[in-house]
Amino acid sequence: MTTVVTPIGVSKDGLFAIDALAYKHHRVLAANTVETFAVPTDAKFVLFSCTADFYVDFAATAAVPSADVTDGSGVDLNPTVRRLNGVTNISVISESGCKLTMIFFRE
């Protein structure tokens, strides 16, 4: 299957809406099991949704926090939309079994 990442933007009438035909991934995550996903070619943004709390790392392997992190390398808890800026892999973990969706967009 060819990856077709649709653009994100504002329609001509000034309304913002996500294209229903967007390029989507969905995953069933096992509790406390890290998964890493490749970012589709040309994707510049990702929109997340999940049925439970989840942690994301865009630069390393995600982990459920167990101690303070104060050097800027912490994970994101339940991110919504992120600009990918050259990110090639997304690492995700949840303490609970859950369902995760990722919708990818280009500019």
Image (cartoon, rainbow, N blue to C red):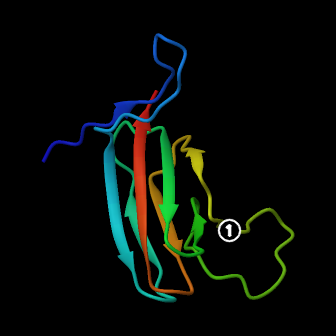
Look at the picture and state if 17 lies above or below 15. Answer: below
Q: Is residue 68 left or right of residue 16?
A: right
The residue carrying pointer 1 sits among few (fewer than 14), some (14 to 19) or many (20 or more) residues within 10 Å by Cα, namely many
**Residue 52 screen position, x and y as percent:** 54, 75
Locate residue 65: give its quadrant: bottom right
- Secondary structure type for disc 1: loop
Residue in view at x 49 percent, y 24 percent:
9
Would residue 106 appear left or right of 71 to someone viewing this image?
Answer: left
- Comparing 66 with 21, the one in front is 21
Out of 52 and 27, give the one closest to the viewer.
52
User: Which residue in the structure is indicated by mark 1?
Assistant: 75
Residue 7 against residue 61 in the figure, above or below: above
Residue toward you, 98 or 57: 98
Image point 32% across, 37% down: which residue?
Answer: 5
**Is 83 above or below relative to 63?**
above
Q: Amino acid at mark 1?
A: Val
Q: Residue at x 55, y 15 (%)?
A: 14
Measured as percent of width and height from the top left, residue 103 is found at: 41, 49
Drawn side of residue 21 relative to residue 85, left or right: left
Q: Residue furthest top?
A: 12
Q: How many marks?
A: 1
Seen at 28% across and 38% down, the residue is: 21
Q: Quadrant of residue 54?
A: bottom right
Residue 94's spot in the image, x, y percent? 54, 80
Image location (x, y in percent) of residue 23: 31, 44
Residue with the most extreme left position: 1
